[in-house]
Amino acid sequence: MFKRWFPAAINTRPSEWSRAAIGMAFGTMFSIWLCGQVFGIEIAQHLVGPLGASAVLLFAVSSGALAQPWSILGGYLSAGVIALLVAHVLGRTLGSACLAAGMALIVMCWLRCLHPPAGALALTLVLADPLTVALDWKELGPVMLGAASLLLCALAYNNLTRVRYPKRPNEPVPMIPADHPPGDTLAITAQDLKQALAEMEAFIDVTPEDLEQVIHASERYAKRRIIGDVLAGRGV
């Protein structure tokens, strides 16, 4: 049971960690600086927590579904609107802040823009400092400016460092004709993976198309390994 608590190995190189860390540092700094220039540094620093968390996703796991442009923009907008509505109706208390975060989660799932740092943003906006509270609905200004500037940094930095962002639609994987069935493996499609993911009843930060590509790539490597073992056994 205790083995489940140990993390799995990370399949990325230390150079990728450094690349993501540099991008996160500069992206967060730029977004906070820009918000500070427009709305004041006190208000900008109030958003440093959610923006820093978003930067981890946008620079370190930019291929994930939670890190795509619509996720951060839609997530921040949804959380901001919900938080301000709850603050106006129920006041700015710890209970209302937690309620706003829960409601924001439901709205983000409905709009397909789930972004975990947006939950922290909802808490932050309800329990805001007096300067931020004074902005009232204008609080959405620094929120969306911070999200947009961080997204622009991720777009520029990731692509300049040869990491494709945002994630592009995957090309369809060629299907195996019915009259030529596969040898020892089954032709798994994206629809099969969608049904399998639905049975798990949990959110997994990967698309069925990504899983399909991984499975087909694994099948190719397995076939190469098997062929290599056969040829080695024959002394070729």
Image (spheres, rainbow, N blue to C red):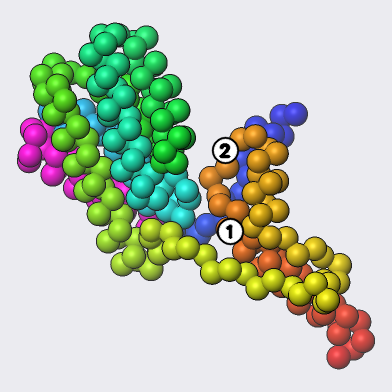
Quadrant of the image for the C terminus? bottom right
Q: Quadrant of residue 87?
A: top left
Identify whether 169 is placed above or below 98: below
Closer to the camera in the image, 65 or 120: 65
The residue furthest right is: 234
Q: Residue at x 69, y 71 (%)?
A: 175
Q: Which residues are magenta?
A: 18-41
In the picture, the quarter occupied by the N terminus is: top right
Q: Is residue 57 in view from this perspective? A: no
Tell me the tag on residue 140. none
Position in image of residue 157 (x %, y %) = 29, 60
Q: Which amino acid type corresponds to the residue marked 1 in the rendered image?
A: Glu
Q: Of marks 2 and 1, which one's residue comes earlier in the chain?
A: 2
At x 66%, y 44%, the residue is: 197
The residue that appears at 41% across and 30% down in the rendered structure is 107
Kind of element beneath mark 2:
loop
Tag 1: Cα neighbours inside 10 Å, few (<14), some, or many (≥20)?
Answer: some
Disc 2 designates what residue? Answer: 203
Q: Which residue is mark 1?
A: 209
